[in-house]
Amino acid sequence: MGNRLVMRSLGRLPRQFTTPKRFANIVFCAPDVGATEFREKISYAKAVSENVTLYCCMNDAALNTSYLLNGEDRAGAPNVPIIIEGVETIECALHDTSLLGHSYYGNSSAIMRDLFSIPKEQTLADERKWLRKNKIPFHGEMWIFQDFPVNLTWTWHFEEQAVPDTTGRVQLTSE
C-alpha cells in the first residue's frame, strides 16, 4: 500500500521537482499496485528521480492472491514482467525466503545487500556483479540474481576517517 501512496504523491509534486531531478533513487519493493496503474503512473517517478527500480517476485503469494481478488496483475508479482524503459526491474524469486513470498526484500540478505547498494554506492543494475541481464522475448530485459552477492563491506565517508590505533582498534579522527 505504501508503493501506491508514493506513486500517487509523486504525481502531485510541482513541476520544478523535475529540473533538476530531486531524488537520486526511487525503489518500489513488491508493489500491490495494478499493472495498468503502475505503467500509467511510473512516469511520475521517472520525472523526479535519476534512477527508478522495481523489485518483483513471481512467487509472491500475497500479491498473487491480490491478483485473484482484483482481476489484474500486480506490479510486484506480474505474470508477464513489467519492463519499462528507464526502470530497472529485478526479479527476486530465486532468493525468496519468506512463507508467503511477500517479504523477500526484508528477509533475504542477498536482496538486502542489493537494495542497500542502490543509495549507498549509487550503482545501477549493470554495475552490480551479482545481477545478470535476462532477455524476455517480446518484452525487453530485466535483471535476476545470478548468484548470492559477495559479502560486501561499506564504509561511510564523513569528515572523520577510521584510523587503526596501536592496539588494532579503529578510532575516528577528524581532519
Image: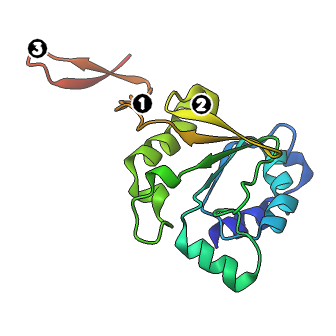
Residue 68 x/y as whole percent:
68, 82
Q: Amino acid at mark 2?
A: Thr
Residue 53 x/y as whole percent:
67, 46
- For label 1, the residue is 156
Please tell me the numbered disc located at residue 166.
Answer: 3
Residue placed at 63% from the left, 69% from the top? 2
Is residue 38 rendered to the left or right of residue 148?
Answer: right
Query: Mark 1 near mark 3, Cβ–Cβ under 8 Å?
Result: no
Callout in the foreground (3, 2) = 2
Is residue 135 rendered to the left or right of residue 21?
Answer: left
Is residue 32 rendered to the left or right of residue 17?
Answer: left
Above or below, 64 against 111 in this view is below
Q: Amino acid at mark 1?
A: Trp
- For label 2, the residue is 123
Decide if residue 6 is in sight here: yes
Decide if residue 124 is in sight here: no
Distance from Cα at disc 1 to Cα at disc 3: 22 Å
Residue furthest toward the front? 137
